[in-house]
Amino acid sequence: MRAVMLALMSNYKQVIDYLYSLRNHGSSYGIDRMRSLMHELGDPHRSFPIIHVAGTNGKGSVCAMLEILYRKSGYKTALYTSPHLIELGERIQVNRTCLSEQGLLGKAEALRPIADKLAKKQPMLKASFFEFITAMAFQHFAEQGVDIACIETGLGGRLDATNVVQPELSIITTISLDHTDLLGDSIEKIAFEKGGIIKPKKPVLLGNIEPTAAAILRSLANERGSPVYSIHDRFKNKALRPHTNLSGDYQRWNAATAIYATEILSKKFPLQPSDGLCNVNWPGRWQITHFQGKTLIFDATHNAEGCQQLVEQLEQLSNKPIVITGALGEERGKALIKSLASYACELYVVAPNDERATSPEFLISCLPQNLPYTPKRSFISELFPSVGHCAVGQKGDTILITGSIQLIGEIQQRLTTNKAICLSKLQDKI
């Protein structure tokens, strides 16, 4: 048995190394490679119904809410999200069961010769890391015979690898400035890119979207003959927006989006009454954990829009927390650190294990000079030196960990496992 396990671990490491090579190979932003790969696989994504979700923020939360609403009504559900926190298999779930290491191994070994053959025939069609994982997910969902799949875009929409799908419903949650180097430097340009998931004659649901972006999306939908729904029409009164166990007023907007989506699809996918929205499992979104007598809050805020929501949450705390933060990208990091500065009693700045990590020195340089504490440049390995050990704070303290999903995942992994294979390197480059 031990020999079998060692062989599995060895093979799994080889798969991880292969996926890492795809990530390092890089990729131009586009959808043609994914279409070709899907064709070689027999178009598995066409064998199950899909809800396709894009947006600057909230798309993962909406997918998680939709998934539990349908699963509680007896549907066999698929959930595809990115990035992962700790395990790569988190991205690919059926009935909220992550694809296991053995499952990932099998799927990757089956897909690799097909992807490699395609790349050998036409080098420009070499799959990127995200495209390969997306193809694995679609293949898995088809083999599992899911009743409905909630699919989150990786980046943007129009040219995203997931946009090969023909969904029952497209959802766009929010639109704000993020990934401007790829999606454009204005709300209008970003709305156009995310609006690329709107399909001809298929309905689209607009979440909490400001008027300028909404006008762009309505225009795109009109050109494609797609019915448009908006939660601003359905939930005009705040009191009508459903509650959820996920913290924050913005999560009520997400819950409203999920509920309205199920109403739009109710003829084809009727639901039973359930407490699904009170039991949403979506780690890393103002996730509160009690550890060694301390309260740890993990929050995946990583862009300007998210910073506004984070401040709303911080204002509700009775005492200022110790803050541990690190960001990917200077513009994101600058907005984040400025938002956090006045709400912290202590501030530790670290660099996530990612080549896109912003220099802690740069982040500290963005802080005002008259803070009542001295910001500290630190390392994750110092703050969390061993499995189950948090070296920051005392019993009774609140510690907020925020800035990127990669940072949160890295710290959660250090708290819970000493696993040799570190999957934080397997995050999307774009």
Image: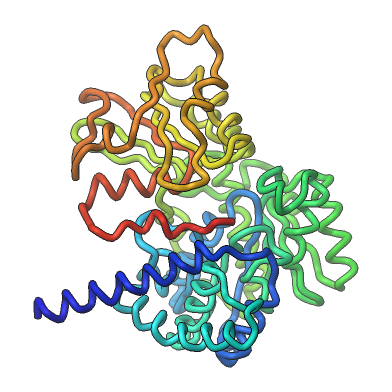
Task: Give the image location of residue 82, x and y in percent.
Answer: 50, 60
Q: Decide if residue 29 is on the left or right side of residue 421.
A: right
Q: How many marks?
A: 0
Q: How is the image coloured?
A: rainbow
Q: Is residue 56 positioned above or below 69 on the image? A: above
Which residue is at the front of the view, 407 or 277?
A: 407
Q: Is residue 412 in view?
A: yes
Against 144, residue 58 (above or below) is above
Residue at the spot x=37%, y=68% of the render?
Answer: 16
Q: Nearer the viewer, residue 300 or 185?
A: 185
Q: Residue at x 70, y 77 (%)?
A: 32
Q: Quadrant of the N terminus?
A: bottom left
Residue 425: where, in percent of width, then height? 41, 56
Q: Is residue 245 visible?
A: no
Position of 409 compared to 413: left or right? right
Q: Is 165 displayed left or right of 319 in the figure? A: right
* Residue 181 at x, y percent in the picture: 71, 48
Residue lying at the far left in this picture: please name it: 1
- Residue 36 picture quarter: bottom right
| Residue under the image location 20 percent in, 31 percent down | 293
Residue at 42% from the left image edge and 18% from the top image edge = 375
Residue 109 locus on image (x, y percent) = 39, 83
Please state, as top left, top right, bottom left or bottom right, where the C terminus lies in the image.
Answer: bottom right
**In the image, residue 352 above or below residue 205:** above
In this picture, residue 303 sits left or right of residue 324 = right
Res 123 quadrant in image: bottom right
Task: Compare residues 326 and 19 and report the one nearer the observer.
Answer: 19
